[in-house]
Amino acid sequence: MGYLSGRTVVLGVSGGIAAYKSCELARLLIEAGADVHVVMTHGGQKFVTPLTFETLTGHPVMTEVFALSESKIWHVDLPGRADAAVIAPATANIVGKIAHGIADDPVTTFLMATRARVVVAPAMNTAMYEHPAYRENEARIRSFGHVMVEPGEGFLACGVVGKGRMAEPETIREHVERVLAPQSLAGKHVLVTAGPTREYWDDARFISNPSTGKMGFALAREAWRRGADVTLVTGPVGLPDPVGVRTERVETADQMWERTMTAYARAEVVFMAAAVGDFVPEARRPGKVRKRDAAEGEISIPLRLNRDILRALGERKNGKLLVGFAAEPAGAFESAGAKLREKNVDFLVANPIDGPDRAFAADENRVSLFRRDGRREDWPKLTKDDVARRLIEVVCGTKADTTEGGGSHG
C-alpha cells in the first residue's frame, strides 16, 4: 500500500467548474486507502452537491463554518485529525484568501486551523492565472510550505485556450502521496533507467526483449515521492511519464548510453533497471530484407557486443550509490553476486526470467538482493511498487561506497 493508506485527508472544494474533477479525486484517494472528508465553499456547492461527496466518502460534508459534526465543532476537530489537505479546485479567490489568512468559509477556516500538509491545485481563467496579484499570492502560499500543483494548458470553460486547467486527479493524488511520504531522498539527484532497448538489423525489424519498464518506473515514482529530483531514461514502453519526473525516452542501447552518461554526471543515487540489449547487429541493412533474399530459407545476422553501461558507471562511481539489476534464470542467481563485484555496484537485484515468478511483463516480482559485503536477501513475491519502496528503504539507510574503479568490499 502507498502512503495514503490509513491517513485522514481533507478535500477542500471551492467554486470552479473543475469541481466535477474533485469527485474523481475523492474516489482515487479512497481507492488508495485514505479516509476522505470534504469541506466546501458556498460556490463549490453550486457546481457539485454535498450529497455527491457524502455518497463517495461516507462522511457528512462540512458546508457551514459554525456547524457541528458528531457534537464537535468540526473546524477545530477535523483540522486536528487531518494528515493532509488538498484544495481542488483552488480558485483565484480562494488562493487570495489562503495567502492573506482570511477565514470566512469552511475551506479557509479549516486551513487556518490545521497543521496538516497542504496541496493546492489552482484552476482559473488564463488572465486570472497570469495576473500579478495572483502570482504574488501563489508565491506567498509556497512560502508557507504548501505544495502548488501546476495547472495544465488547453481549452478552458470560458472558451479561451491557455493555462489554467486544474491538473488531472491522478496527478494531484501523486502530490498528496508525496507530502505524506518520508522525505528520505530530499535534495538528492536520482537517476533511473528502465525498459528494453531495440537494435535494428534492417529498417523494419529489431532485436529486443520483453521488458515493460514497470520496475524502473516504480523506482522513479517512489524516489520522486521521497523528495528526490529524478531523471528517468527509458527505452520504448507503453507507460505514461511518472508525475514530477524528468523522463527521457530513447530506443537503442547507444542512445541509452548517451543519455545515461549525461544524467550520471549530477546523479547521487542510480538505479539501473533497464534491460539493455547485450548484442547489436554488426550492420543495419537499409530498407527491408525480403524473404526471397534468404539463402535456402535462412538468413544470418552477425552480432557484436554492445557497450556495457553498468560496468562503465561502476568505473566512474566517485562516491555515487549504484544499484544494478540482473535478469537471470531462477536457478542461476549466484552469478549475480559475481556481477556485483565485477561491475563495482553497491547492490545488485536479481530478477528471474523463467518459471512462475518470471519478472518480464509482470506486475509482481520475486527478487534477490545482493550486497557488497556478500550478504544475499531473498525477498517474497511483491508488487513492483512494493519492491521499489523496499529497495529505496535499503538504499536510504546506506552510504555509498567511495572505492574508485572495480574495487570491492565483498
Image (spheres, rainbow, N blue to C red):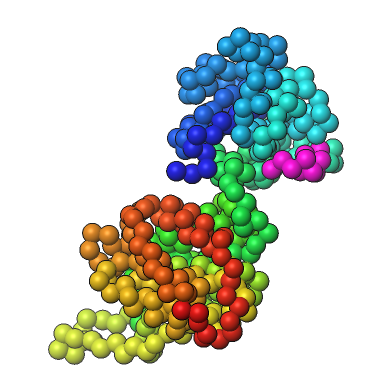
Q: Report the number of numbered marks.
A: 0
Q: Residue 117, position in %: x, y? A: 67, 38
User: Which of 212 and 199 lies nearest the eye of the viewer?
Assistant: 212
Q: Is residue 245 magenta?
A: no
Q: Is residue 251 visible?
A: no
Looking at the picture, tell me which residue is in the foreground, 23 or 349: 349
Q: Is residue 167 above or below residue 64?
A: below
**Residues rendered magenta in the picture:** 137-147
> What is the quadrant of residue 270 in the picture?
bottom right
Q: Is residue 321 above or below residue 17?
A: below
Q: Residue at x 63, y 23 (%)?
A: 78
Name the image quarter holding residue 366.
bottom left
Give the side of residue 230 with respect to residue 273, left or right.
Answer: right
- Side (left or right) of 67 relative to 95: left
Q: Main secondary structure of the magenta part?
A: helix
Q: Quadrant of the N terminus?
A: top left
- Could you tell me residue 74's position as x and y percent? 65, 17
State the image coordinates of residue 31 (x, y, percent, origin top left). Answer: 45, 35
* Residue 315 in view of the camera: yes
